[in-house]
Image: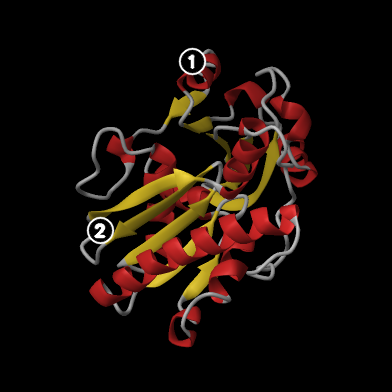
């Protein structure tokens, strides 16, 4: 069997998210800042580079499967002939509306492939998104709100006296006697309560469904939610960093 390498690139609002695949199977992922298109080879993991060298594969012939929610970045990367743009038409889910983010759709598809349908996915990225898919692989709907760090940053940039704080590893005391603690309490308890309410409503519709968190702040958000949910819901929650690339693996295996 011939050895093939594929590269996945998901362009988010603040960073590039990368992965490599061996014969379409997901291997590992990494993140970078936005960078020039001629520099991505510098960041490919050593084990991937070793296979490329040993098998005498040509770097400029290795396909890059692009998932992007930033149109200006999409245009830049499509200059490379090996780039293949993934669109909603590639995702085998139904009822996807035209402006649904490709990252949300692909992440939900990846979650369903791994954990089964129905599935609820909560992505703690720059935007915090909630996406529900039913047992027929049909989009039920979801919600979008500013992500945790974006909310923290907005208080700092939109006011004269409030500082930007670092997300704590666990929920802080609810009743704070200082400004940084008050900011953490206000945002984290409010977001946790709101997302928990979505989860409880989803569980009433689909009691057997898993709730999968992902994204840069997904692991922190998982801990916040587990501290804020009823005990019988906690066991249904999982954190999985690479849902999008698991979904992409299933898509590129069709090419």
Other residues around mark 1 within 10 Å, as few (<14) / some (14–19) / many (≥20): few
Residue 205 placement, left or right of 24? left
Residue 53 placement, left or right of 123? right
Cβ atoms under marks 1 and 2 closer than 8 Å: no
Residue 246 placement, left or right of 138? right
User: Eyeballing the image, is 46 above or below 34?
Assistant: below
User: Eyeballing the image, is 9 above or below 169?
Assistant: above
Residue that badge 1 annotates: 75
Which x, y percent locates residue 156?
A: 68, 37
Residue 14 placement, left or right of 136? right
Foreground: 193 or 116? Answer: 193
User: Eyeballing the image, is 122 above or below 22?
Assistant: below
The count of marks equals 2
Q: Which residue is found at the position 21% from the left and 49% from the top?
A: 94
Q: Quadrant of residue 254?
A: top left
Other residues around mark 2 within 10 Å, as few (<14) / some (14–19) / many (≥20): some
Foreground: 185 or 118? Answer: 185
Sooner in the amino-acid sequence: mark 1 or mark 2? 1
Q: Secondary structure at mark 1?
A: helix
Q: Is residue 221 visible?
A: yes
Residue that badge 2 annotates: 137
Which x, y percent locates residue 142?
A: 32, 52
């Amino acid at each position: 069997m011939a050895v093939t390498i594929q590269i996945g690139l998901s362009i988010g609002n603040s960073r590039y998210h990368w992965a490599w695949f061996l014969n379409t199977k997901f291997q590992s992922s990494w993140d970078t800042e936005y960078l020039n298109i001629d520099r991505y080879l510098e960041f490919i993991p050593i084990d991937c580079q070793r296979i490329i060298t040993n098998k005498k594969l040509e770097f400029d012939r290795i396909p890059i499967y692009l998932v992007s929610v930033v149109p200006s970045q999409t245009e830049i990367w499509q200059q490379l002939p090996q780039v293949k743009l993934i669109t909603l038409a590639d995702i085998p889910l139904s009822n996807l509306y035209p402006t649904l983010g490709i990252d949300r759709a692909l992440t939900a598809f990846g979650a369903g492939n791994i954990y089964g349908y129905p599935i609820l996915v909560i992505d703690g990225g720059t935007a915090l998104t909630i996406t529900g898919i039913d047992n027929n692989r049909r989009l039920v709907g979801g919600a979008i709100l500013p992500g945790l760090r974006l909310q923290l940053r907005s208080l700092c940039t939109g006011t004269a006296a409030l500082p930007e704080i670092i997300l704590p590893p666990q929920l802080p005391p609810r009743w704070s006697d200082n400004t940084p603690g008050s900011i953490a309490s206000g945002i984290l308890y409010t977001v946790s309560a709101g997302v928990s309410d979505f989860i409880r409503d989803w569980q009433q519709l689909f009691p057997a469904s898993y709730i999968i968190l992902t994204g840069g702040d997904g692991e922190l958000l998982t801990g916040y939610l587990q501290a804020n949910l009823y005990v019988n819901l906690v066991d249904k929650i999982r954190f999985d960093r690479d849902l999008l690339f698991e979904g992409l693996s299933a898509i590129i295996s069709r090419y």
